[in-house]
């Protein structure tokens, strides 16, 4: 077993408890939805978030738990920082692709079956990604999910560096500042529209991938200077 394969296996084992919790949460949510639907009798009164969308929350743990806790274990196994980070890029890409495929398949299940009994919210329709067809939906999701993971990777890779805490402070401070000042609020809205609600697949995918690469480069900067202890 080479180091990359070992790292991918270790990352799955690290995420397995969170995956099981998410699967349990989604299962309980679906059972509760069925009970509510049967109780109401009118599906129009029962609108739920897509189960696949709920499960996609696991990406938050992919981008935070892995860089925060897996680095030391991998280094102690004899891997170099480059091997670790290359392996993490593969892991991030794999999980982004898995959830992109999952959400596409589940949307078809919702349209063809579930919505006969209850209404659902689905991010593929909310963000308008469904307008690009199956291939376009996959790539736009992949870029958006990788962007989210890349941001979290940057934040949690820098926890042991003073500049990492500066990034955290800037990030936390930027949220209320950009949402409270009208001019900045419009800038934030325009940025989100360009990234997540873009009517051009090439522009939307290109922007998400470019920002992801910048964030991943920042994550590598912290990783290259990260101590093992």
Image (cartoon, helix red, strand yellow):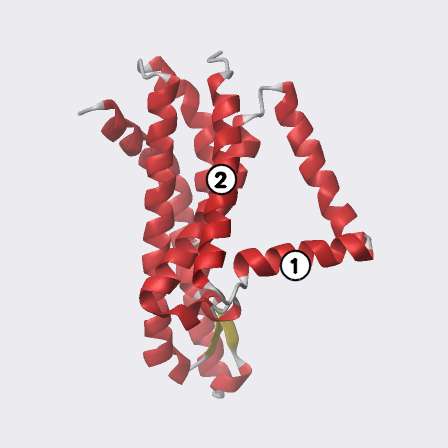
Q: Is residue 60 visible?
A: no
Q: Which residue is mark 1?
A: 190
Q: Is residue 88 visible?
A: yes
At numbered mark 2, what does the secondary structure look like: helix, strand or loop? helix
Q: Quadrant of residue 102?
A: bottom left
Q: Residue at x 42, y 64 (%)?
A: 51
Q: Quick one: label 1 or label 2, which is nearer the N terminus?
A: 2
In the picture, the disc for residue 150 is: 2
Q: Badge 2, how many Cα within 10 Å: few under 14, some, many 20+? A: many
- In this view, the residue in front, 138 or 206, is 206
Residue at horizontal 37 percent and vertical 35 percent from the top: 89
Residue 173, image x, y percentages: 74, 40
Q: Position of residue 33 (x, y in %)?
A: 46, 72
Vertical position of residue 60 compared to residue 204: above or below: above
So how many labels did they put on this image? 2
Circles 1 and 2 in contact, beta carbons < 8 Å: no
- Residue 39, numbered label: none
In terms of depth relative to the viewer, which is nearer, 165 or 25?
165
Look at 32% across and 80% down and name the residue there: 112
Q: Is 141 displayed left or right of 186 in the figure?
A: left
Of badges 1 and 2, the one in the foreground is 1
Residue found farthest to the right: 181
Q: Compute the Cα span from label 1 to label 2.
A: 21 Å
Residue 170 to residue 43: above or below = above
Q: Can you give x and y, in whole percent of width and height, for residue 9 in the image?
A: 27, 33
Which secondary structure, mark 1? helix
Instruction: Residue lying at the far left in this picture: please name it.
Output: 1
Q: Quadrant of the N terminus?
A: top left
> Taking 9 as reference, is 131 left or right?
right
Whole-percent x, y for residue 48 in the image: 50, 71
Residue at 51% x, 16% y is 225
């Amino acid at each position: 077993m080479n180091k990359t394969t070992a790292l991918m296996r270790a990352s799955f084992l690290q995420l397995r408890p969170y995956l099981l919790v998410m699967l349990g949460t989604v299962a309980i949510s679906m059972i509760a939805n069925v009970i509510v639907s049967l109780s109401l009798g009118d599906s129009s009164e029962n609108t739920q978030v897509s189960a696949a969308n709920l499960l996609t929350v696991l990406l938050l743990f992919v981008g935070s738990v892995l860089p925060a806790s897996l680095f030391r274990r991998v280094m102690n196994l004899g891997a170099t920082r480059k091997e670790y980070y290359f392996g993490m890029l593969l892991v991030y890409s794999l999980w982004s692709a898995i959830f992109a495929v999952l959400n596409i398949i589940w949307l078809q299940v919702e349209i063809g079956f579930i919505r006969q009994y209850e209404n659902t919210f689905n991010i593929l329709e909310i963000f308008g990604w469904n307008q690009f067809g199956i291939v376009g939906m996959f790539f736009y999701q992949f870029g958006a999910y990788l962007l989210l993971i890349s941001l979290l990777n940057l934040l949690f890779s820098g926890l042991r560096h003073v500049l990492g805490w500066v990034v955290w402070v800037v990030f936390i401070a930027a949220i209320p500042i950009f949402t409270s000042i009208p001019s900045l609020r419009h800038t934030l809205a325009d940025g989100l529209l360009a990234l997540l609600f873009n009517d051009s697949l090439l522009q939307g995918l290109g922007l998400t991938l470019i920002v992801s690469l910048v964030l991943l480069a920042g994550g590598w900067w912290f990783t290259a200077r990260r101590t093992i202890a």
